[in-house]
Image (tube, helix red, strand yellow):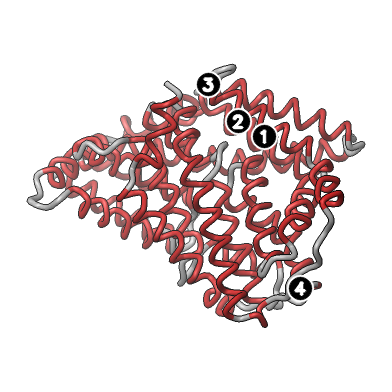
Amino acid sequence: MDPTIVGIIGSVAMIVFIVLGVHIGTSMAITGFLGMVALTNLDAAWGILQTTPYSSMANYGLSVIVLFVLMGQLAYHSGLSYDMYRAAYTWLGHLPGGLAMSTIVACTGIGALCGSTTATTATMGIVALPEMKKFGYQGGFSAATVACAGTLGTMVPPSVLLMLYGVMCSLSIGKLFSAVIIPGVSLMFAYIVVAYIMIKRRPELGPQGQKYSWKERFEALYHVKDLLLLIVIVIGGMLAGLFTVNEGGAMGVFGALIVAALRRKLSVEMLKKALLDAGKTSAMIFMIIIGAMIFNQFLAVSRLPGEMASFFSDLPVHRNLVMVGMIIVYIFLGAIMDEIGMLLLTIPIFYPVIQALQFNPYWFGVILVLVMASGMICPPVGMNCFIIAGVDKSISLQTIYKGVWPYWFALVAMMVLMFIIPELATFLPQFLE
């Protein structure tokens, strides 16, 4: 049988495994192993199974993921999440939709610590939903706001998705971080505008909060000075070239430990929780990476990525139409798997196409996280919607789905803007060179 046909069959089989509920990493590993048996022989497949787990993990570049995940866990267990949310509320709470705006801004700040959509959504769900309910916000609007604002977790540095993308494609992670800053901040403001318009049109969704004095606002800001300073030092230091991304992660962990100590939150029990949570998250990510690497070797032997790159580059259509097709595929995959699984599954297939069509790889990285963010909130699944439904079981999934559409359209508008003005992603990397 033609190797490319075997590659296609293997890809379909792997998606079937995932739909049936098999772990993403396991699905990719099993499919990759069986595919290698079909294309080569059992001994070669066993050899890959024996060597790939170590060779995949013995990568200095991957240490940055563990470091930033640990930094986020230390910051969370230090109580920074609530303080960030409270500070945002003192500045924005008096505006129409002010509490929703505060949630969006706080999600951006938490995302700058943990770099993960799911972690940001779960954290802010625990912090923000009870507060929004207490102030009289309608449950569906509150839940949809937190679910959608959680997508900002990967739209600001240090984004775990961009780190993995950079490692897999041998791109500068520092440049990827700089590329996502303007689109990420723009998306935050787009969400804020959506919240404002929704409350202005339907005031029953949520009342305006009290107006704080300038003194109270700056006092609230003072309480998160350590968080803001940590973000500025880590992200700013990397972008300015003062230290590498890995060194930035180490600085982040060290800074988070100092912050915890200054807040008198540092204890053996706190360290144990942070380390265990960081270990579980990192192990989950690495399990998916190992499976992806085995599957990628199968794809390489099948020659499917190269054939797809040649096919799409030779199509008599504009390259933007090919990109739109990829975006549709990502939205579909977002209904059946998480963002890390999507990334590791598709990059070996799609990245050669991106190169053949001569798209800027840093621009594509930003498009990638935008598309995956849309998949995380888009029905019929939407991982973030499930997370919020799990945090507050009084709000049904159907109610959350109804509330996410205005924010989802803001995401789509941001994607369109990225096509019209690609400099949104390419300006900073070029400026910082």
Q: Secondary structure at mark 3?
A: helix
For marks 2 and 4, give the CA distance: 34 Å
- The part of the image, by quadrant, that contains residue 324 is bottom left
Q: Badge 1 is on which residue?
A: 231
361 left or right, relative to 123 = left
Residue at image position (68%, 24%) is: 251
For marks 1 and 3 on the same chain, the one whose residue lies earlier in the sequence: 3
For marks 4 and 1 on the same chain, the one whose residue lies earlier in the sequence: 4
What's under tag 4, amino acid-wise? Lys
For marks 4 and 1, give the CA distance: 30 Å
**Which x, y percent locates residue 367?**
38, 47
Q: Is residue 338 above or below residue 75?
A: below
**Which x, y percent locates residue 381?**
49, 68
* Contact? badges 4 and 1 (CB < 8 Å): no
* Contact? badges 1 and 2 (CB < 8 Å): yes
What's under tag 1, amino acid-wise? Ile
Q: Nearer the viewer, mark 2 or mark 3?
A: 2
The numbered mark at residue 235 is 2
For marks 2 and 4 on the same chain, the one whose residue lies earlier in the sequence: 4
427 left or right, relative to 188 = left
Dot 3: within a 10 Å radius of its alpha carbon, few (fewer than 14), some, or many (20 or more) residues?
few
Q: Badge 3 is on which residue?
A: 60
For marks 2 and 3, give the CA distance: 20 Å
Q: Is residue 268 visible?
A: no
For marks 4 and 3 on the same chain, the one whose residue lies earlier in the sequence: 3
Q: Nearer the viewer, residue 344 or 11?
A: 344
Q: Quadrant of the C terminus?
A: top left
